[in-house]
Amino acid sequence: MLILKAIGSFFVKIWRWIKDTAWVQPLLIVGAIFAVIFSIPYISEWVSQATGEQAGSFYNKFSKSLEGEVEVNDGKAEASEADKFTNILVANEELVAANTGDTAPANLDKTLGTKFFVVFTKEDCSNCDTAETGFKYLSENWNKTAYAPTVKDEKFTMYTISASEESTTDKDYENINGSTAFNRYLSNYMNLFNTVGPRLLDAPYYTRASLSEANYNSFSLESSSGSNPIANFPVPTILLVDYTEAAFKAGRAGISEVLFSVNGDTPSERASHLKDMWNHTDDYASDTDNLFLDNKAVA
């Protein structure tokens, strides 16, 4: 008890000294203000972590991991989740390219779903974080009036691959195309991007919006001026993969749409942009030739 009284007495004396010493009070007030200001980022980070809302947390729910990624010169890699996922895309793209009818081939692999987003993202990427808020809002409001797919009961589905993910196999590779798991991944599937990229230049979104070809060329892994195409891959890259009957009728099956940023000042506006991407629409007034607006195409 004597120790507690001594400690209490010590703090009482300090408090009295502060009250009786006028010049100390404004210094303490200013110091407290600065302490609060400098603590804001740490408080914000702590709150984000506590609520599970830190940047990338929503993407992580849909991740296809690059762990175990290797470099192959011939054949298909099957070392990582991302490999297995992408090999399905590759096989289906080959079937779509060879398909001459307006219905899906019987042997099309639909284990990933009939329609889904694919997002290539990375850490410390403001545009990736901005797009993420749109995806989160869209998923939370899916099938509500303003965020409904054209076809009733379609399920919101997406997959993500992070360019920032490290693999335990990274230490085994030192060349410029294999120093990170994501670089090896791009190198392994270069043919896919080489093939899909030019085709997306014919998509209505690109042709109507008169967009720059720069991101499309980078997505296609085309080199310019001796640059390393893998190092210039645009992130975020947002793909829409569509294996629905409507996509085959419209001649837009497979990897059919791409975005490199999401428009909108708020999560709801970004969600609307992504919903339009899902529905293959932009502005109804200028979209009169879009077969996805034909009831027969989307039935």
Image: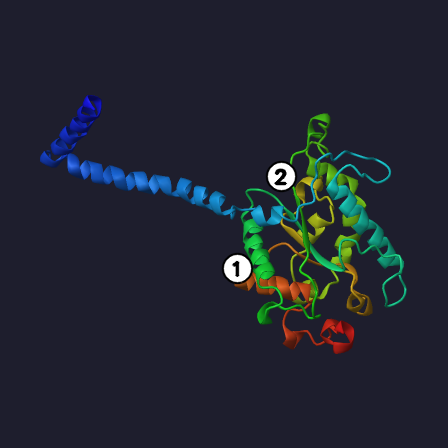
Residue at x-position 69% and y-position 70%? 152
Q: Is residue 263 above or below residue 289?
A: above
Q: Is residue 22 visible?
A: no
What amino acid is found at the position of numbered circle 1 in the picture?
Answer: Pro
Q: Is residue 231 left or right of residue 13?
A: right
Q: Earlier in the sequence, mark 1 or mark 2?
A: 2
- The Cα atoms of the two marked residues, 1 and 2, are separated by 24 Å
Whether residues under marks 1 and 2 lie with C-beta atoms below 8 angstroms apart, the answer is no
Q: Which residue is mark 2?
A: 164
> Residue reaching furthest left?
20
Q: Is residue 33 visible?
A: yes
Viewer-nearest residue: 125 or 68? 68
Pinpoint residue 39: horizontal percent, then vertical percent.
36, 40
Task: Report the quarter where the N terminus lies.
Answer: top left
Q: Nearer the viewer, residue 159 or 70?
A: 159
User: Is residue 226 found left or right of 130 in the rendered image?
Assistant: right
Judged from the image, the secondary structure of the residue bearing numbered disc 1 is helix
Colour basis: rainbow
- Residue 66 screen position, x and y as percent: 70, 39
Neighbor class of circle 1 (other Cα within 10 Å; few <14, some 14-19, many 20+) is many
Q: Residue furthest top?
A: 3
| Residue type of the residue flagged with mark 2 | Ser
Reading the image, the residue beneath label 1 is 267
Q: Residue at x 74, y 77 (%)?
A: 295
Image: 211 above or below 217: below
151 vs 192, nearest the viewer: 151
Answer left or right for 203 relative to 37: right
Quarter holding the C terminus is bottom right
Q: Residues within 10 Å of mark 2 (few under 14, many from 20)?
A: some
